Image (cartoon, rainbow, N blue to C red):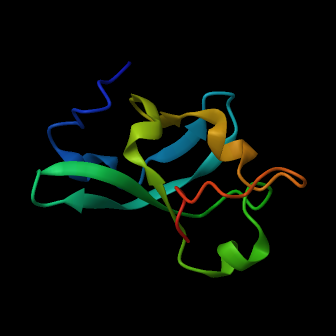
């Protein structure tokens, strides 16, 4: 089920506990919490934990998790699908100037 990225589910708490996968089918993590902009009443990010160790280095895995921008969300259903950009964040030799994922 596709979702308008600007309109999160009516009960945003239903996202907590859902697994997050890239649109290539790679497990990214599990939603632990949401980042909200209270002024605009919008979801701005998904706080993930139980991270895929192959996508995130050990230092991030030892921390609480990461926040993925909500604009990366492609679909919400039984699972959440995000852009595959999350798979390319820490590849060796690539420019690591993208600071959208916060540890």
* Residue plotted at (38% across, 19% down): 2
Which quarter of the image is occupied by the N terminus? top left
Compare residues 72 and 54 and report the one nearer the observer.
Answer: 72
Q: How many marks?
A: 0
Q: Position of residue 76 (x, y in %)?
A: 38, 31
Image height of 62 relative to 54, above or below: below
In the picture, measured across the screen, residue 2 lies left or right of residue 10, that is right
* Residue 98, picture quadrant: bottom right
* Residue 65, picture quadrant: bottom right
* Residue plotted at (72% across, 79% down): 59
Compare residues 37 and 65 and report the one nearer the observer.
Answer: 37
Image height of 8 relative to 86, above or below: above
Toward the top, the furthest residue is 1
Toward the right, the furthest residue is 93
Q: Position of residue 66 (x, y in %)?
A: 53, 65
* Residue 90, picture quadrant: bottom right
Compare residues 16 and 66 and report the one nearer the observer.
Answer: 66
Image height of 8 relative to 62, above or below: above
* Residue plotted at (67% across, 31% down): 25
Image height of 16 relative to 23, above or below: below
In the picture, measured across the screen, residue 46 lies left or right of residue 57, that is left
In the picture, measured across the screen, residue 68 lies left or right of residue 9, that is right
* Residue plotted at (38% across, 44% down): 70
Which quarter of the image is occupied by the C terminus? bottom right
Q: Position of residue 22 (x, y in %)?
A: 62, 36
């Amino acid at each position: 089920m596709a979702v308008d990225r600007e309109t999160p589910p009516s009960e945003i708490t239903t996202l907590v506990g859902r697994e997050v996968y890239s649109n290539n089918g790679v497990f990214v993590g599990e939603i632990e919490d949401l980042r909200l902009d209270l002024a605009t009443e919008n979801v701005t990010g998904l706080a993930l934990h139980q991270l895929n160790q192959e996508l995130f280095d050990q230092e991030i895995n030892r921390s609480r998790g990461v926040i993925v921008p909500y604009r990366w969300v492609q679909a919400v259903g039984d699972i959440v699908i995000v852009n595959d950009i999350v798979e390319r964040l820490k590849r060796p030799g690539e420019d690591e100037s993208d600071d959208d994922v916060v540890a």
